Amino acid sequence: MMKPSFSSNFARGQKLVRYLLVAALISGAAGLLLFREGTMQQAVCVLLSAVFIVSVIVVAARDCRCPSCGKRIISGVLVLSVCPRCKRNLYTGDKPKKAKKK
C-alpha cells in the first residue's frame, strides 16, 4: 500500500500573502510618492492598496491553516514553519524529533 502524499495549502497561502503584501506596499508608495495630493490617480492607488490588504486578510483566514490539526495561523504567517498547537512542520507534516535522554 502506498503512503499518501502530503500536500500543504499553507505554503501556497503563505506565498500569496507575501505577494499581496508587497503589492499593497508598492501601490501605497506609488500613490504617495508619484502622484500629487488629491488627484484621482492617488485615490485609485490608495483604494487598490486597501483592496490588497483586505485580500491578505481573506487569504490568511482561508488558506493559512495547519494541514495536520486545522488551526488557523494568521499571526506570524510569514515566519512560522511549525504549528504552534500540534508542533508539526507546516510544509512536510513531520512530527518533531524527541530529545534523546541520557
Image: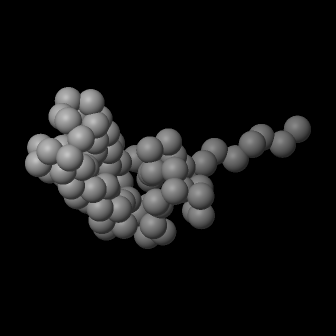
From this view, report whether residue 51 is shown above or below residue 29. below
Q: Nearer the viewer, residue 19 or 99?
A: 19
Considering every residue shown, the one lying at the far right of the view is 102
Q: Seen from this angle, which residue lies furthest top?
A: 34
The number of numbered badges drawn on the structure is 0
Residue 44 coordinates in the image, percent (x, y) = 14, 50
Instruction: State left or right for residue 93 relative to residue 3.
Output: right
Spot occupied by residue 84 in the image (x, y as percentages of width and height) = 59, 58
Report the side of 100 relative to 59 (left or right): right
Q: Is residue 2 visible?
A: no
For image coordinates 48% across by 68% down, the residue present is 71
- Who is closer to the viewer here, 71 or 97? 71
Q: Which quarter shows the C terminus?
A: top right
Q: From the top left corner, tell me how far across and down residue 55 is, in percent.
A: 26, 59
Tell me which corner region of the image, top left, top right, bottom left or bottom right, holds residue 59.
bottom left
* Residue 23 pos. (x, y %): 24, 41
- Front-lying residue, 101 or 61: 61
The reply to whether residue 61 is in sight is yes
Q: In the displayed image of the protein, which residue is found farthest to the left?
A: 40
**Residue at the location (21% across, 55% down)?**
47
State the residue at coordinates (20%, 29%).
34
Residue that appears at 35% across and 62% down = 57
Q: As drawn, is 100 to the left or to the right of 25?
A: right
Residue closer to the observer: 28 or 60:
28
Scheme of image coloration: one colour
Q: Quadrant of residue 42?
A: top left
Is residue 30 depicted above or below 42 in this figure? Answer: above
Q: Quadrant of the N terminus?
A: bottom left
